[in-house]
Amino acid sequence: MKNSVYLLAIILVSLFSCKTSNSSFSKTDKPIATKGDTVRIANDALEYEVIIIDPGFSSWLSSRALPRNYHSQSYLENKNRIWISEWNSRVLQPQRYNPNLYEMTINYDSNIDYGYEVNYLIYNYMIYFQNTYKQKLFGYVPIR
């Protein structure tokens, strides 16, 4: 069976279509869905797959993320391990954290070398997520 790493942030349609007047997002904070908002990386040799679905992430990645190789792979892995651990903790506490934001756990094994690109995309998604949805998973979060 294929081991998979899934980073699936479901399009938060229900969050954006609510008719409440107490929205925690200003109009400028809402991601704008663009064509190609799904980022997917797969490697059959290592049997993993990363899928990121979130409106606006692709355009954010191309316009705001630091360039590849700015951080080392070990730096990205360490940040991902910490942030994903907190993410998974929040998935298990739907009464405390918004279950529309934390819908499913991320299967990230720090003993597996996923390579630079996978860690780069996960790291940048975590920054995007925290800044866009006003969440703080742990420690310093760059504002971009």
Image (cartoon, grey):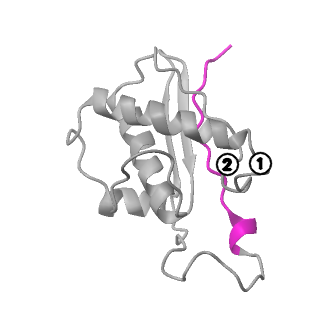
Circle 2 — which element? loop
Amino acid of disc 2: Tyr
Instruction: Give the residues drawn in magenta, as a range.
Output: 1-16
Mark 2 vs mark 1: in front: 1
Query: What residue do we see at 51% from left, 58% from top?
Result: 36
Instruction: Give how far apart the Cα atoms at labels 2 and 1 are.
Output: 8 Å
Q: Dot 1 surroundings within 10 Å: few (below 14), some, or many (20 or more)?
A: some
45, 74: nearer the viewer: 74
| Residue 45 circle label | none
Q: Secondary structure at mark 1?
A: loop
Residue 92, above or below 11: above
Q: Is residue 4 magenta?
A: yes
Q: Position of residue 65 (x, y in %)?
A: 31, 55
Q: Quadrant of the C terminus?
A: bottom left
Circle number at residue 102: 2
Q: Is residue 69 left or right of residue 95?
A: left
Where residue 83 appears, x then y in whole percent? 49, 39
Q: Quadrant of residue 5?
A: top right
Q: Where residue 79 sits: x, y (%)?
A: 39, 36
Residue 30 in magenta stretch: no
Residue 103 is left or right of residue 111, and the answer is right
Residue 94, numbered label: 1
Q: Mark 2 and 1 residues: CB-CB less than 8 Å, in contact?
A: yes
